[in-house]
Image (cartoon, rainbow, N blue to C red):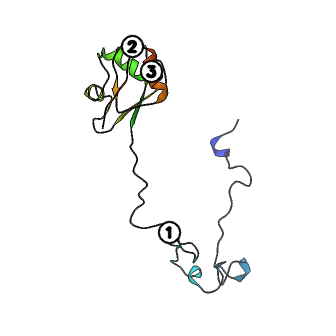
Amino acid sequence: MSLLSNLRPSRGSVKRRKRVGRGNASGKGTTAGRGTKGAQSRSGYSLRPGFAGGNLPLHLKYPKRGFNPPKRKEYVTLNLAQLVYFVEKYGLQEVSPEILAEKGILKKKKPFKVLGVGEWTVKVPIKAHAFSKSAIEKIKAAGIEPQIIKA
């Protein structure tokens, strides 16, 4: 039976601290393993963040004044399966960004795109800023014409 008083760390897992600057006989005397002269041999030295050993640091290589990728329209996307769920849950008579925003599903400011994951099983008209090709095919297969809203 092992007792708390007998517990020890496993052999070789705990190393002794290196005592530097305790005379030349210790093997780490005089310069204490720091070499001679230079900033690294002095106390209080610390490498500043971003220093690249004399090379041009990364933060100076990149262009200044902001990186502006080409502007593209970002849509909030919803799948057909999600829309069918919301139509059945809230009993919606039509699907449009205004109605979805009213129910707290969308935010009013961003355009809305319908993706074609799932099936359009409800007979409800649908309006959006954009549709994927597969979504258009599935909605038309259900006998409904999708309406594209100009943003």
Q: Quadrant of the C terminus?
A: top left
Question: In front of the other: label 1 or label 2?
Answer: 2
Q: Position of residue 51 (x, y in %)?
A: 53, 72
In the depicted structure, whether residue 58 falls above or below residue 42: above
Q: Secondary structure at mark 1?
A: loop
Depth check: give the residue in front, 44 or 17. Answer: 44
Q: Is residue 77 left or right of residue 127?
A: right
Q: Position of residue 69 (x, y in %)?
A: 43, 55
Residue for point 30% across, 14% down:
91
Residue for point 25% across, 27% down:
102
Labels 1 and 3: the sequence-earlier one: 1
Q: Quadrant of the N terminus?
A: top right
Q: Amino acid at mark 2?
A: Val
Q: Label 1, label 2: how many angstroms apart (C-alpha)? A: 59 Å
In the depicted structure, whether residue 49 falls above or below residue 118: below
Residue hosting label 3? 81
Residue hosting label 1? 49
In the depicted structure, whether residue 78 falls above or below residue 88: below
Residue hosting label 2? 122
Q: Is residue 84 left or right of residue 43?
A: left
- Indicate the quadrant where residue 122 lies: top left
Query: Callout 2 environment at 10 Å: few (<14), some (14 to 19), or many (20+)?
Result: some
Residue for point 63% across, 42% down:
4
Q: Are marks 1 and 3 in contact (CB under 8 Å)?
A: no
Q: Amino acid at mark 3?
A: Ala
Q: Secondary structure at mark 2?
A: loop
